[in-house]
Image (cartoon, grey):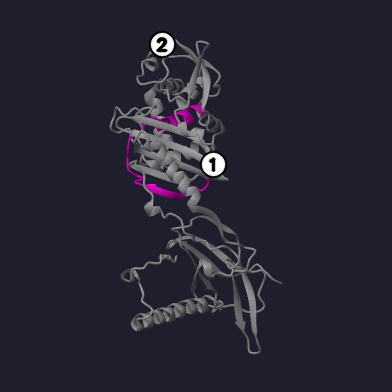
Amino acid sequence: MIFQKKHEKSNDKSLRIFDYKNKNNFFLIVLYLIIFLFVNLSFFFTSQINFNFNPSFQSLYADDLIQNQTQDQVVKKVIPSSRIDIAGTSGIVINYKTGQVLWQKNPDMQLYPASTTKMITAILAIENIKDLNKKIKISKNAAGTNFSSISFRKGDEITLMDLLKAALISSANNAAIALAEYVSGNEKNFVNLMNEKAKQLGALNTNFENTNGLDNKSSNKSTARDLAIIASYCMKNELFKELVSIPKTTIHINNKEINIKNTNTLLDIDYIKGIKTGYTEKAGYCIVTYSNKNGLELITVILNSSFFGKNYDAMRLINWVYDSYINEKLINSKIAFLKLNIKTDSSNYYYNLYPEEDFEYFLNKADDKVLYNYFIYDDINLPLIPGKTYGKIILYINNEKVKEINLIFKDS
């Protein structure tokens, strides 16, 4: 990017950058102009060189490809990830559909998860309860759970569905215990289910000690990455997805209507559709969000932030991703990747080689560099056979191999 600075006219000659009556300055200006023209002309001519294929191992950057000559340049000037930070100790943003990590900070640091724990409590309840409309009575143990947003007394009657709403929407700690007791008989057995489920999902740095996230034990910990994995799994369940997106609703205890409100105030933003907040003294302020804007779905996790920082951190990352990433078709099977030049005694023949399949990738417009390595087989004989493989494309993003695709001949 070229920056130009405009100078205002001044009567003070000492402020002038150049004195055009001075020969030395005049020659300097001419020299600068010659250098400027030489550099730009060199760039112009080198950028116009057409790619001539030689059948050997080659590398191309995205902007040099035949396929991309009619597309916009992939890499554009946006805020690089190195300039993005959060107040929270740990955080991560992933592409919900693919699991691709789009931003991270201390993603594998074990921290207290607070009430984000209730995500796995709720999904296990949904998967293990056949009739959520069934009424149950609150036990003495569940009624006595502290720090709950809804008061329960021993013997209170409530449906399992309303317990689920209370746990996910209002973040009621006692509701989580009541659900666990119904599914497994007691909280300890249910916690074993929670840890088994976490391991099955690949959340390998997580250990739950209770159903609600109260950090009364030092070993009740998880990570931003693990919570993103758990959240992604939970959001595949339609009932879970529906409940965490509800701003406010009513439940019934002993047939008495109780109004509850979602602890996630980001639901006021139209593209935020869930999921769960959390807070304890040790955990700080935590949030896990699901957002969907223009078809791009994200899971964002913030751990150990501040009261105001929690939402600010989440929205800063979410909006930055929506501004910085683009879903780009890096390989298009309908467009020729390169021309194959085969020389015979009598003539030269040119044949288009095509990728065997399409490939799309979610690119960071500021950070990601795309490199195409490819090779062509040596033993190529005429005639070429449609559908036959004559080479391979190896695609790298930031020097990491992400895809290998066959190059085939399509024409008759």
- Image point (66%, 89%), residue name: 346
* Residue sticking out furthest to the bottom: 345
Q: Is residue 250 magenta?
A: no
Query: In the rendered image, which quarter is residue 107 located in?
Result: top left
Question: Which x, y percent locates residue 88?
Answer: 34, 41
Q: Can residue 32 be seen here?
A: yes
Q: In this view, does 358 lie above or below 130?
A: below
- Image point (35%, 45%), residue name: 108
Any mark on residue 102, and which?
none
Q: Residues within 10 Å of mark 2 (few under 14, many from 20)?
A: few
- Sequence-earlier tag: 1 or 2: 2
The residue under label 2 is which amino acid type? Answer: Lys
Q: Distance between the residues labelled 1 and 2?
A: 41 Å
Q: Can residue 201 be seen here?
A: no
Question: Which x, y percent locates residue 114?
Answer: 36, 31
User: Label 2 near label 1: C-beta < 8 Å?
Assistant: no
Extent of the magenta region: 97-126
The residue under label 1 is which amino acid type? Answer: Asn
Q: Residues within 10 Å of mark 1 (few under 14, many from 20)?
A: some
Question: Which x, y percent locates residue 328?
Answer: 55, 57
Q: Is residue 244 left or right of residue 353?
A: left
Residue 134 vs residue 2, the one in the foreground: 2
Residue 158 vs residue 305, the one in the foreground: 305
Determine which residue is flagged by label 1.
292
Residue 313 vs residue 246, the one in the foreground: 313
Residue 372 vs residue 24, the one in the foreground: 24
Any mark on residue 154, and which?
2
Quarter of the image with the N terminus is bottom left
Question: Which x, y percent locates residue 388?
Answer: 63, 69
Q: Is residue 328 left or right of residue 152?
A: right
* Residue sticking out furthest to the right: 412
Of marks 1 and 2, the one in the foreground: 1
